[in-house]
Amino acid sequence: ISFHWPHATDLSTCVTLPDDPSTVAARPVLTLWARLLGDQEREVIRVLLDCCLHERSWNPYYAHLGLKLVQHSKAHRLTTTYCIWDHYKALDELSTRELVNLARFNAFLVYRFSLSLSMLKVVDLADCIDRPKALFFWRIFFQNLLLGCKSAGQANELFMRVVKERKKLGPLVSGLALFVRGSLGPWLATLEPGADNKGGQNGASGKGLSKEQCDELMRRVRGAERILSSAAAVSNALS
């Protein structure tokens, strides 16, 4: 971390993963954050995300720490959102490892309801179809988003929250409906139990998804497809 940021010496107590990463690790960072202003404050998230992306395999430490920072205040949540948006613009320049780590970090914060799925309003999902790295990223993001939910009901709730705001988020709802039906669903249907797709829930250990996980993933993606397609049809009828 010190390579990236001159204030990293103050963060040294956070580098070792404690027993409770979601609470203990955040304390010194929040203490440091309280002493920073403007660009220095935003730099904390930038460094955190850069370190996450450069891990050789997925390390949940950064996601748990990011979760506590995002939950701390609205300002931190906005800073994190803008930082992730900046990375959306550079997907074509990231390595596979960086894409997977970013997708899992982002998905974690969304399925923990600390960031909203509506943050995808800045993304044109149709555009990623002809961009292999962007397509890979969004598939891994949604795979981890769906599997990270504790239940199918929680997964549905993520999409329902976006649908409820379809008057403001109509293009996003339509874009999600097309992507889930035309790209995500067909891709997930090709996944075989035990095969490592480099970015699934077990990707960090080199293990593929179990048959139970594959089946549950398909149930959840079909549920999302029904919710989004119904909402998109209503929006199109009203437009």
Image (cartoon, grey):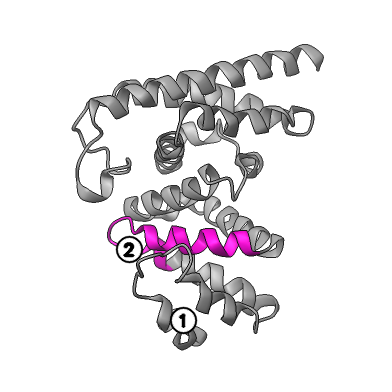
Give the number of marks: 2
| Residue drawn where x is 46% and y is 62% of the image | 22
- From what the image shows, is residue 26 above or below residue 116? below
- Foreground: disc 1 or disc 2: 1
Q: Kindly identify the amino acid type of the residue bearing the numbered disc 1.
A: Leu
Residue 55, numbered label: 2
Q: Percent x, y for residue 16?
A: 34, 74
Asked whether the viewer can see residue 187, the reply is no
| Residue drawn where x is 41% and y is 68% of the image | 51
Local secondary structure at mark 1? helix
Location of the N terminus (image quadrant): bottom left
Q: Which residues are magenta?
A: 51-72
- From what the image shows, is residue 82 above or below residue 215? below
Which class describes the residues within 10 Å of circle 1: few (<14), some (14-19), or many (20+)? some
Which class describes the residues within 10 Å of circle 2: few (<14), some (14-19), or many (20+)? few
1 or 2: tag closer to the N-terminus: 1
Left or right for 107, reference 227 = left
- From what the image shows, is residue 148 above or below residue 93? above
Residue 11, numbered label: 1
Q: Percent x, y for residue 90?
A: 50, 54
Q: Percent x, y for residue 160?
A: 63, 28
User: Toward which corner of the image does residue 124 lie, by quadrant?
Assistant: top right
Work out whether residue 98 or residue 7 is closer to the camera in this orientation and state it. Answer: 7
Tags 1 and 2 touching, CB below 8 Å:
no
Q: Percent x, y for residue 185?
A: 42, 22
Q: Kindly identify the amino acid type of the residue bearing the numbered disc 2.
A: Glu
